[in-house]
């Protein structure tokens, strides 16, 4: 089986103010077992490392002479039996506040700059128990979240709160 490297350059998207997260997630979802993704970005995309690690990807990153970054994402081998997990120390170090009870996971991303609220919510969804609901609190209506939810088999309903923030109820479809 041969290895194919797919290159995704998001520098123009970011410079134009477009959020490349859904484009990156679409590209990784389309990768075959031995395929790799070479991402080129104008900065080191650290929040993406955790998101893709939870989906079974490792990465190697290097800064280019131009100051841009190249990050090679490679899927962990299923045969190795290694499944990336978030340790309690890593969980506590993330931006955003995540709290759990038996049926509801609350994620508070108010005060975070984009794309961190989206990344934090998607990270929490990756570990959401099958019968639980996620409640996400954000400063803005999370328009970029809805297509990501649909791709992952979730649905979300958002309501504006009296303080001007937004509360999104997310559950599996």
Image (tube, rainbow, N blue to C red):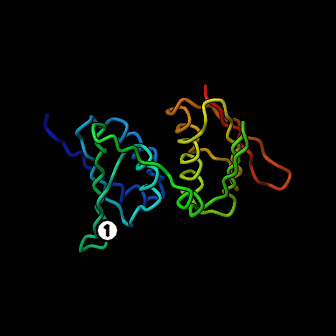
Point 47% across, 53% down: residue: 18
Image height of 55 relative to 131, above or below = below
Point 28% across, 42% down: residue: 80
Image height of 105 relative to 18, above or below = above
Q: Where is residue 139 in the image (x, y as percent from the top left)?
A: 70, 56
For mark 1, what is the residue?
68
Point 41% across, 61% down: residue: 45
Residue 172 location, quadrant: top right
Image height of 65 relative to 51, above or below = below
Which quadrant of the rendered structure holds the N terminus? top left
Point 28% across, 48% down: residue: 74
Q: Residue furthest left?
A: 2
Q: Where is residue 50 in the image (x, y as percent from the top left)?
A: 45, 54
Q: 10 or 44: which is nearer to us?
A: 44
Q: Residue furthest top?
A: 173
Q: 88 or 47: which is nearer to us?
A: 88
């Amino acid at each position: 089986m041969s290895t194919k490297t797919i290159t995704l350059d998001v520098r123009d998207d970011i410079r134009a103010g477009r959020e490349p997260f859904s484009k990156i997630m679409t590209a990784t979802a389309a990768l075959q077992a031995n395929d790799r993704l070479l991402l080129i970005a104008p900065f080191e995309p650290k929040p993406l490392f955790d998101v893709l690690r939870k989906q079974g990807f490792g990465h190697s990153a290097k800064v280019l002479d131009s100051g841009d970054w190249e990050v090679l994402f490679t899927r962990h081998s299923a045969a190795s039996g290694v499944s990336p997990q978030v340790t309690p120390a890593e969980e506590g170090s993330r931006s955003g506040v995540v709290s759990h009870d038996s049926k509801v996971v609350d994620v508070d991303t108010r005060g975070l700059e984009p794309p961190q609220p989206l990344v934090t919510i998607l990270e929490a969804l990756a570990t959401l128990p099958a019968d639980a609901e996620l409640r996400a609190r954000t400063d803005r209506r999370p328009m970029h979240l809805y297509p990501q939810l649909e791709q992952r088999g979730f649905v979300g309903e958002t309501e504006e709160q009296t303080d001007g923030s937004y509360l999104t109820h997310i559950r599996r479809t």
